[in-house]
Amino acid sequence: MGSGKCIGMANKPGQSFGELCLLYDCPPPADCVSSGDPNEAEKACPDGSACSFWRIEKTTFRRILAVRTMRRDVRLREALQSVDHIGELDVEYLKKIADALHATSFERGETLFHEGEESDTFYLIGTEGKVQLSGSATGSKVLGPGMGFCENAISYDLSDELRNDGGGKKGSSGGGDGQPPVHDCTATALERTVILSMSKDHFEKVVGSLSDAILLSRDRRLLRSVPLLRDTDLEDFEYELLTALIETVVFRLDKEIFIEGDCVDEPALFIVRHGAVEIISEEYPRLNRVVQPGGFFGEDTLTPDENMRFGGAKGGNKYSDETVDVITDEVVLGKLTLATIDSVIQDLHRLGCRRKKNYNRKGKKKDDTLEPVDSLDDLEFHRLFGAGTFGRVWIVSPFGKKVPYALKIQCKRELLDQRQAGGAQRERAVMVKLDHPFVCKLVNTFQDEACIYMLLQFVQGGELLNLIQGGDVYGGLPESAAKFFVAGILEGLTHMHQRQICYRDLKPENVLLDKDGYPVIVDFGFCEFFFDRRFLLFILRLFRSRARETSRLTITPRPAAKIVSDKTYTFCGTPLYLAPEIILSRGHDRGVDYWALGCLAYEMLFGTTPFYARGIDQKGLFKRIVRGKWNIPKEHNKVNRTAIEFIWGMLQRRPAERLGCLAGGYRDIKNHAWLQEVNFGKLIKKKIQAPWVPDVADPLDTSNFESLDDAEDEDFLKGKAPLTPKEQLVFQDF
């Protein structure tokens, strides 16, 4: 019932209603009233009621979907680990492959391929079915669920040192000369079978070269095992950068790479890829050894001298503790120089010791570019800037100084009553890790008995939304301006993603413009951390073992109900910018931010969001998003074709095929033809003239925002019950 009128009926067995409430936190669009005939009640329902139905709550529904997806991920990734060559890849690559596999059903007796045909696709049997491989030379064998075959279709061009000759190649042969192999058997489904497959071309689009992926995976694992780096508190993205910057060098027999006692001109860590070297030390005989492929040397050259100065270009005098001789005809090495390490980690004194983070004892960031504030008593309150359910935002500054800040004040009681205390804690934890010119900075946090306080960078230029809505006659921005803002937002998102943070609420209201006209991302209440990939396989195996212990889906470890490894299942965000995987509860990662960036790029160019239609309700909106149904307004044929291709790439329904989620990651977005004119080096240094610079009269000017000067500042704490000592513990680390 809506507005007193009947707007729909569910009067047949099997019909349903209320499904939108399972997907999104929203009130029912209409009242649902039983209208059964009381005289027929006994026939209709055994208990005599006018109507009976099955009901499922949103929490239960979403948990069932999440557990189903998690179990699928467990099975897929463990199956991929058992496949020759693919099993050598690290978790990030396995995730990409698992998400990109294409599912096809075959009935009993159907043929997948015939002997002698070219083999260009890798196959993996899903959760059900059997496949028989029969060949004139190979005989017959039967494969079951979780088993892969024809892996040689994607690994035939591996280099000799990466190829494992001992691995069995089921389903295809040949390819050793760099040519695609052919099937050495015929594959037939023995029963209804679900096959997951990936072609060679698709594999390289999603993962890149298998040789490069194996090499990077090996190098990444090895770098994590080097004591000097292992004892350094490096972020995941720093390991990735270091791995990508390892160069390959070749030395011949009897070449002395280091000589004991000699000054090292170029300190470097070396990884043996092919061949062998012998290490001899007269002063430290315990160091004597032969280093085979998979080993490393040169770690000692990366440490400072007795004056705490590093060698090479850093001016220190670093002497080698050992002589390193090549003892094979040729040795192929990976070389990571000290200069390269310095360019990535920024401070060589981090090496070998846990990083002394630039935070105070409570973990709050100290930003050297902003005036430090150690107490609320040091702040002068100027004007009310924002008001909401949980509290207020004030423009403040240190006494006697015109350095503006935004002070976000939140009521502890309201946060607890609305179950948002965890979100506030997570927002603080996220902002502590972020330090980027296009991301709002957290200066400090405070608390008292009733409230928590977040002292934030004040971004004066207003919302990006205001700029979009004030665009040309059709709405939107000039294409050059859209490129500028997309590039800046991408830099901010990349900074978050590198720190295992997914933003999840990108929209023009959450992008402010600073006094120079550059975009700054704000509001981190929906952000989520991902588990470190180093713990991923452990977590997956633990989850699987627990799943075997019980057949009930409702008994789930609390963290796993929300997040497993590299995906999260929380339904959040703004409907117009939601990615399909969020709506479908399939688990999501940073790909949802790229989807939202595609929606935002569309909105900047055309003045409206891609999936909005006049008169559409939320259910219709979600259907359009899941189907990927959008088009370009006819009035906007002036937009460059590369802009349309950019948006098309960002709005791919499958995350594994989305721009930013492919082999090149965020670099694919930066290198897209539409953004080729953007100099990202100058952008990050703010050396590019912004397309629009806000009018700012003074450091405390708030004229670019809606004025609240006439609003009454009611006491939002009035009537709030004080917290108990136990409740105060929730905020003890804030």
Image (spheres, helix red, strand yellow):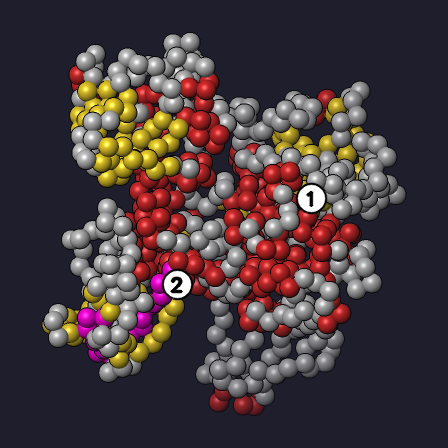
Q: Nearer the viewer, residue 26 or 367?
A: 367
Name the residue at 59% across, 59% down: 646
Left or right of 19 in this view: 96: left
Q: Is residue 190 magenta?
A: yes
Q: Which residue is mark 1?
A: 519
Question: Is the residue under label 1 in contact with that under label 2 (CB below 8 Å)?
Answer: no
Q: Is 82 positioned to the left or the right of 365 in the image?
A: left
Secondary structure, mark 1, is: strand
Q: Which x, y percent locates residue 590?
A: 51, 51
Relative to 225, say whether 501 is above or below: below
Q: Amino acid at mark 2?
A: Asp
Residue 182 vertical position relative to residue 276 in the rendered view, above or below: below
- Disc number lying in front (2 or 1): 2
Q: Quadrant of residue 644?
A: bottom right
The range drawn in magenta is: 183-203
Packing grade of label 1 (10 A; few <14, some 14-19, many >=20) is many
Q: Amino acid at mark 1?
A: Pro
Q: Any magenta on residue 611? A: no
Residue 613's tag is none
Q: Quadrant of the C terminus?
A: top right
x, y (%) of residue 546? 30, 53
Residue under pointer 2: 201
Residue depicted at x 29% and y 64%:
180
Q: Position of residue 683 (x, y in %)?
A: 65, 40
Which quarter of the figure has residue 494?
top right
Vertical comparison of 427 with 44: above or below: above
Q: Earlier in the sequence, mark 2 or mark 1?
A: 2
